[in-house]
Structures are given as C-alpha cells and as structure tokens.
Amino acid sequence: MMQYTIDINADVGEGVGNEPALMPYLTSCNIACGGHAGTTETMQTVVKLAKQYGVKIGAHPSFPDTEHFGREPMDMSFAALFVSIQKQIDSLMHVLQEEHLNLNHVKPHGALYNLAANDEKIAMVIIEALKRFMLPVKLYVPYKSVIADLAIKNKIPIVYEVFADRQYNTDLTLVSRKKTNAFIHDSDVLVEHVYNMVVNQKVKTVGGEEVDIKAETCCVHGDNLDAVNLIKNLRIYLEEKGINIL
C-alpha cells in the first residue's frame, strides 16, 4: 500500500500571538524576520517554542513593508531587495545560533512569494540569497512555479507547498484575498481539500476543475482567526487516514 507523508507548516511571529496553541500540531514553521512583521523579541519567543515542540524552523522574509504587511509588491531595485532578504534571514539566524539550532528552510511571504512564482528576476534574487549558505537550506515553493524550476537548476533543495485554507485558480495561483471566496473556513471542506492534494495529487479549483499538484508541505495561515482549530482538525484527520505527519 502506498505510504503518504506531509509536513504541516504555519506562518508565525506575525503579531497574532497564537503560537503556543499552534506549535503542538505543526511540524515546521515560518518565522517573520522583520520585513512585514517580527522583531528580535518575537523571533526569540517563537524560536524557543519551536525548539520545545521539535518543530522545524524556517525564515519568512518579505518585501520590507510593515504598512501593507508585505502583501503589496514594492518598487525597489533587485540589489536592495537582495540586501533586505539577506538581512532578514540573518536576523533569524542570529537568534537560532543563540539556541544552537539550524535553519531548515526559507519561505518567502506574501507578494514576494506570489511574484517569485512567475517572475524570473524576483525568483533569482531569492535563489542568490540562499546560495550563500554552507549547509543545504530548503526552499518552500509552489508546484510548477518559476522559482521551483530555478531552484532545481541552482541545486537548491525544494519542498512543494500547498495551502490548506486557500482556494486555487486553474493556473495554480491562489484566489486573490480581495475576493470573498479566497479562503476556506469550513474544517470539513479544508481536510478534504488537503487530502485530495496529498493522496490524489489533484486540487479542485475555484471553478470546479481538478488540476495536477504536488504537496510535500501544507500551510495553514497563522493569522487565520480559526488557525488553531483548523490545524488541529487537519492533523487528526490525516493521521486517522494513515498519512505520516513529518
């Protein structure tokens, strides 16, 4: 019988304060490191929680824009963006070194994540920022994205990410947050949505089509008001179905 595995991640350190309730159900987390949110103090707090629960730690860099929470593209040079990403990751690395922990992965946030999926120049800025690490740091990326292809070419290890609480368009982009149907709030719908992506390697789009996808890590947004319950129910459901949560 085929054995399926999935990692469950959430974006944390973004000011919501629900990390103590989230951590028991996660296997990895993406910590805001000063771009859209996050301070040295919040990073220290979340890193210690992740260490306590054995949760893998990733950096969650974004455009340096707290005003729009990193969800709007910024008009800045590629050099300035590279420096910003590098600075953000380094700030988390310093906290990890204090706790004798390693950085497992990098997952861009918001507009940076979405642009890198289709924009080769933006994607390369992120790739170049990762290439300087001595140890292999993984990159969380969408399936069939520009940044995934470039990472493979540049020997950056990738992990295909899907979103548990978001609706998909046919081209595998996420339905805009500005639309009322962008999020999945119903726990029963959410668990079936994830199960389909993990086991059948298909996602049912907002238009009702079934599109190929690969899921190696699954994100529930930490700032979702019902994130804790959604992640708890998702983990219980997947484990009952015999899927390994790693």
Image (tube, rainbow, N blue to C red):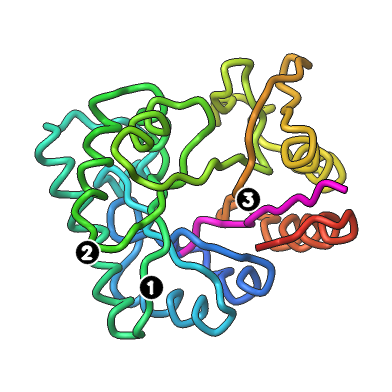
Residue at (89%, 54%) from the top-left corner?
A: 241
Circle 2: residue type: Asp
Residue 5 among those drawn in magenta:
yes
Residue labelled with disc 1:
42
Q: Mark 2 against mark 3, which lies toward the viewer? A: 2
Which is more N-terminal, label 1 or label 3? 1
In the rendering, at what x and y percent does residue 77 appear?
A: 11, 32
Task: Give the class, few, some or many, for how many residues have Cα within 10 Å of label 1's Cα (few <14, many ≥20).
Answer: many
In the rendering, at what x and y percent does residue 36 appear?
A: 33, 51
Quarter of the C terminus within the rendering: bottom right
Residue labelled with disc 3:
220
Residue at (72%, 28%) from the top-left corner?
A: 203
Element type at mark 3: loop
* Residue contact between numbered discs 2 and 3, judged by CB atoms under 8 Å: no
Residue at (30%, 30%) from the top-left corner?
A: 73
Residue labelled with disc 2:
90
